[in-house]
Amino acid sequence: MEEIIEKLKVQLIDQLNLEDFKPSDIDADEALFDSRLGLDSIDALEIIVLLEREYGIKVLNQEDGQKIFKSVRSIAEHISANKEV
């Protein structure tokens, strides 16, 4: 799980242009939205694209998205449980 978390931090920084952050700056349990990361709905769409492209995972509705995108750890847990092999 830690390997997925660390890879995901790097991917999120790249995908979302979080130039002021390093992977070590992001706590795996930190809220992604309404937090110091400053993510918004456009960033949520970018994360959806990332999950589809890199992991073959689709987010089908807003309720699932809110649970999945709670933190880096919650995204990693979802990837681990649903990744296409």
Image: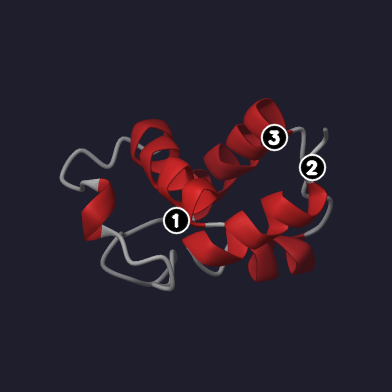
Count of all numbered marks drawn on residues in the image: 3
Q: Amino acid at mark 3?
A: Tyr
Question: SS of the residue at dot 3?
Answer: helix
Distance between mark 2 and mark 1 Cα atoms:
19 Å
Q: Which residue is mark 1?
A: 40
| Residue at 53%, 47% in the rendered image | 4
Q: Which residue is mark 3?
A: 55
**N-terminal label among 3 and 1:** 1
Q: Position of residue 47 (x, y in %)?
A: 56, 43
* Closer to us: 50 or 23: 23
**Front disc: 2 or 3:** 3
For residue 58, above or below residue 64: above
Q: Amino acid at mark 1?
A: Asp
**Front disc: 2 or 1:** 2
Left or right, residue 47 beside residue 40:
right
Left or right, residue 61 beside residue 77:
right
**Front disc: 3 or 1:** 3
Q: Position of residue 23 (x, y in %)?
A: 28, 48
* Disc 3: CA contacts within 10 A as few (<14), some (14-19) or many (>=20): some
Question: SS of the residue at dot 1?
Answer: loop
Question: SS of the residue at dot 2?
Answer: loop
Distance between mark 2 and mark 3 Cα atoms:
9 Å
| Residue at 39%, 56% in the rendered image | 39
* Disc 2: CA contacts within 10 A as few (<14), some (14-19) or many (>=20): some
State the image quarter where residue 69 is shown: bottom right
Left or right, residue 40 beside residue 53:
left
Left or right, residue 15 beside residue 49:
left
| Residue at 43%, 36% in the rendered image | 11
Q: Which residue is mark 2?
A: 58
Mark 3–mark 1 contact, CB under 8 Å? no
Q: Position of residue 44 (x, y in %)?
A: 55, 50
**N-terminal label among 2 and 1:** 1
